[in-house]
Image (spheres, coloured by chain):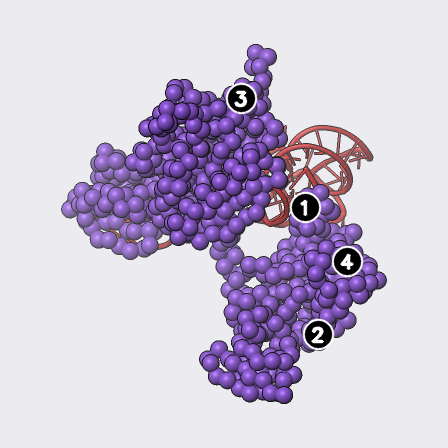
Chain colours: A purple, B red
Amino acid sequence: MNIKVVFPDQQERTLEAGVTAGQALMDWQKEAQTTAVAAKVDGALVDLSFVLTKDATVAPIAVSSKEGLAVLRHSISHVMAQAVQDVFKGAKVTIGPSIEDGFYYDFEYAEAFTLEDFEKIEKRMREIVAADYPFIREEMPRDEAVRLFAQKGEDYKVELIRDLPADVDIVSIYRDGDYLDLCRGPHIPSTGRIKAFKLLSVAGAYWRGDERNKMLQRIYGTGFADEQALNDYLTLIEEAKKRDHRRLGRELDLFQVNDEAGAGLVIFHPKGMLLRYLIEEWERKEHLKRGYDMVMGPQILKVDLWKKSGHFDHYRENMYFTEVDEQTYGIKPMNCLSHMLIYKSKIRSYRDLPLRYFELGTVHRHEKTGVLHGLMRVRQFTQDDAHILCMPEQLNAEIRAIADFVNYAMGIFGFEYEVELSTRPEHSIGADADWELATSALENALRDNNITYDVNEGDGAFYGPKIDFKLKDALKRKWQCATIQCDFTLPERFDLNYIGADGEKHRPVMLHRVILGAIERFMGVLIEHYAGAFPVWLAPTQCVILTVTDKHIPYGRAVHARLLEAGIRSETMFDNEKLGYKIRQAQLQKIPYMLVIGDKEMEAQTVAPRARDGQNLGAMPVEQLIALVEDMCEKKK
RNA sequence: GCCGAUGUAGCUCAGCCGGUAGAGCAACUGAUUCGUAAUCAGUAGGUCACCAGUUCGAAUCUGGUCAUCGGCUCCA
């Protein structure tokens, strides 16, 4: 029997049924033998050994493609698991997927794996690669698979098969050499196709991601189509580490986190504080432009108020408490309560709505020790927080306006971001109907703004669903910054109402939202984003004056005074060093403009700016330099 | 909180099988007065994270605490 096969360029071939996808591809393009690691048959990712029995479209999956690389890495994770079990008898396999920049495999093993063990594992992996074992797919009934893995003592695999949906009758396993693993596939044709890999780190990970379960050992690694790509990646990681905000924070003298003061508590140094001030000032203006009112609540509020809001029941383990005059106070982990009290301070009409209360509110949250991380995860932080109280019919427009605001703000800083919609979590308060209303309000607004988003089931706040905006740091870790949360519950609990056009009392809806999120975290991501080379409008120091010799110091002083007077953030480097040394120092501090002053400049009453990128702008009068800097600030560059 | 690793001068790091600490850079002082990424010389700087224990003797061995790093869980 013959079948018709269609390839990506629309070429058609008539081939005999029973031909494999790989053979079909080679018939179409000879080089597929070396470039393809898997195939797509009628849109489904399969092995090259997949047997074609009917008419189909067949496309190659090249190792250079995103999907091809994922297949390759998944296969490497199998080889690693195989090597681990060869070297460490009794290690049990669990799961081992490919991930964004590599792969991991989780094992249960009595001894802790060390970095020294990596050499042994990698050596065994190279042997497996050299042996060029084909990856062979087999299918079997699930009971048989359970027996097979139970017999091998692979309890985790047994549990995985047992928990498959009831309608799954057949499961697939893959063999290479004498190793076999439960796996959906696909895999590369044989282990010999692996050209470049490296094991990177070992860490603990809970079985099935649940902290109530046993902790397994996870080995992370990565793999690429060739050595060159692997080396490029490793170099990139090294470069990314140089952007780490913790390192730049010290090198640029922005902030410290000090043991003596306490973990997760940031101390801002003058330059870091200046950066923060510039961001906050910009933000205040942007909020006023958009019809927000600035407010401010106290740092501690009586515990009864936290009970009323639900925080005491649902958020207590993250809160700090303090006793004053036999009264218990909760140190605020969120800013909403004061804002509720402001709303309640008088009778509101529908004509007053929406009300938008904005506060750069400092909150404290008792985060678990293991999660603290530079500026990104701290125990005291300041949110650019706002609570919008509006009528249900105003919800859509308000959410859209916030999404626009976020987009505008991210554009100013040049951030790309990802959007997620998080739905009702297990522990939550409020009526089902309100949750549905709130969730669809968020969803509709996203759709109306043509924003693409992923859904994150069960990841909402305890009082309502939310839209999260995530930014990436230098090491590609995602951090939630902006968020919009829709809340019907707090207005209920605080009995907020407004008088409608009908003269009756109605319940307003509340939106919690932040734009930058936590200023600390945002600064952390910002430092990495710019690699410490802040744009002129944000640079703590915009200009540094470099004298060629001591005799230029008096003129240098005059220039410095003029810059300060004009509102330019200027520094001086008058120390007795050669110009090259000063340039290097200024360069390391990533200062936008280095103003060189020597005989020529002093004579002509000019400065000779050298930009951070090494470009020499040529001598110009100080006033011209001031105009230049002001223009950059104006343009937010 | 959990798993693993780490903690020595301001920073980066040496310091073996226990005999009370060393380099480079930075800092300070002096010389030099120099034109676009490091001038030379000298000086100073450490309760070896902290607390116990073992020992004649601990940076080194043991236990605990704190913190940091990489993950997991959680989260702005």
Q: Nearer the viewer, mark 1 or mark 3?
A: 3
Residue depicted at 66% across the width and 48% down the height: A209
In this rendering, do the residues under marks 4 and 1 share a single chain? yes
Are the two marked residues, 2 and 1, in contact with CB atoms closer than 8 angstroms? no
Residue in view at x 42 percent, y 24 percent: A505
Q: Chain of mark 3?
A: A
Mark 1–mark 3 contact, CB under 8 Å?
no
Q: What type is the residue that disc 3 sits on?
A: Leu
Disc 4 on helix, strand or loop?
helix
Q: Which residue is mark 1?
A: A210
Front position among marks 4 and 1? 4
Circles 2 and 3: CB atoms closer than 8 Å: no
Both labels 2 and 4 in a single chain: yes
For disc 4, the marked residue is A158
Whichever of labels 2 and 4 marks the residue nearer the N terminus, that label is 2
| Residue underneath mark 3 | A305
Q: Chain of mark 1?
A: A
Does residue A33 appear anywhere in the picture?
no
